[in-house]
Amino acid sequence: MKRIKLNNTIVLILSVCIILNLTACGEAKVPDTQVSEETEDLVVVGFSQVGAESDWRKANTQSMKDTFTRENGYELILSDAQQKQSNQITTIRTFIQREVDYIVLAPVTEDGWDTVLSEAKEANIPVIVVDRQVNVSDDSLFDCWVGSNFRLEGEKVGEWLHRYFVQNEIDEAGVNIVNIKGTLGASSQIGRSGGLSISARKYNWNLLAEAEGEYTQARAREVMTNLLNKYDNINVVYCENDNEAFGVIEAIESAGLKIGPDIADGQIMIVSFDGVSEQAIELAKEGKISCIGECNPLHGPRVRKIIESLEKGVRPEKFEYVDESIYSSIDSIREIQVDEKAYPITILK
Ligand code: GYE
């Protein structure tokens, strides 16, 4: 229905241009996709993606590309914001101008979305938020959200650490932990940092320092090098994603220090999140990353289901949380509990 309306609008604009012979109209970008016969039956999805900062992100983009194909009945307009919210705002405005059928937004940070999402609402374009959340004054500015429970991920890794310390008779007051945070203000950063501070308070760990690693290997290597110069007693590094862990490993090894879970024997233990790339899983098998809180990036089919239900006029759940596991090659911990719920550990071999 909407696409018919759209094409009528385009026909109308083009006719007016021809009639008035307005050269300025030539500058308006009417994408080929909307006028070509072929695209007429396709559902047009505009996806504003954060960037390509991590393996998780690349897998997430791929999942969307694999799902929203022409064969499946979609035209995907993918836009990479290069980690900048201002780029996402511009992109969403372009999507509105192009009258896409759905806007899918993976927001860089939580705040700052009210204005542009109000514009999408006024244009009657449904907005599906994926991965990180938006913090808006009015929940009707987006249709629904699908992603992970980041605080729970953090608490799960925190409980795993606690179990490990208890099992190995490590005095938790001697745990000196540093947090390499993800992009500040992103839900995944807020949740995972929040999970860590809950555990640190509960178990009396010393949270030595927090630094922003921006979810990238290069930045994490840099901040970890600085932290190692400043502190000589770090024994646990909490990385808010695996790519940061890769950078942290490089920094620790270049400083001539040892990585592993045996902190009583002077090793530095690393934990992280995602578990998407083979490299991360391999490092966990080797014991260089002691524990990974899984974060599932395969949101393409989930977003498709949401769109299919909206197409049928059925309201999807407002918030849909994905189930996730924990990975470790340390096989003495088989399960942890958070809020009285048990979570099994996937043991890597
Ligand atoms: O963990 C990280 C990525 O928001 C869940 O962003 C996402 C995080 C993911 O860059 O690798």
Image (tube, grey):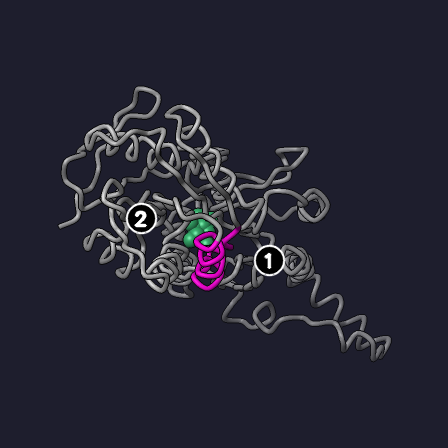
Q: Judge from the rendering whether residue 264 lies leftward or rightward of residue 189; answer left or right.
A: left
For marks 2 and 1, the one nearer the N-term is: 1
Q: Judge from the rendering whether residue 44 lies leftward or rightward of residue 271; answer left or right.
A: right
Q: Is residue 55 above or below residue 180?
A: below
Residue occupied by mark 2:
268
Based on the picture, tell me whether residue 216 belongs to the magenta stretch.
Answer: yes
Residue furthest out toward the top = 340
- Identify the secondary structure beneath mark 1: loop
Q: Is residue 136 above or below residue 180?
A: above
Residue occupied by mark 1:
100
Amino acid type, callout 2: Ile
Seen at 43% across and 61% down, the residue is 217
Percent x, y of residue 333: 18, 34
CA–CA distance in space, label 2 to label 1: 50 Å
Disc 2 within 8 angstroms of ligand 1 (CB) = no
Seen at 21% across and 51% down, the residue is 287
Comparing 210 with 62, the one in front is 210
Comparing 198 with 313, the one in front is 198
Residue furthest out toward the front = 232
Q: Is residue 28 above or below residue 283?
A: below
Percent x, y of residue 338: 33, 25
Mark on residue 68? none
Which of the 4 image quadrants contains residue 68? bottom left
| Bounds of the magenta segment | 212-229
The mark closer to the camera, 2 or 1, is 2
Amino acid type, callout 1: Val
Kindly tell me whether residue 5 is visible in this rendering. no
Which of the 4 image quadrants contains residue 242? bottom left
Percent x, y of residue 91: 64, 60
Seen at 43% across and 33% down, the residue is 206
Neighbours of disc 2 within 10 Å: few (<14), some (14-19), many (20+): many
- The main secondary structure of the magenta stretch is helix
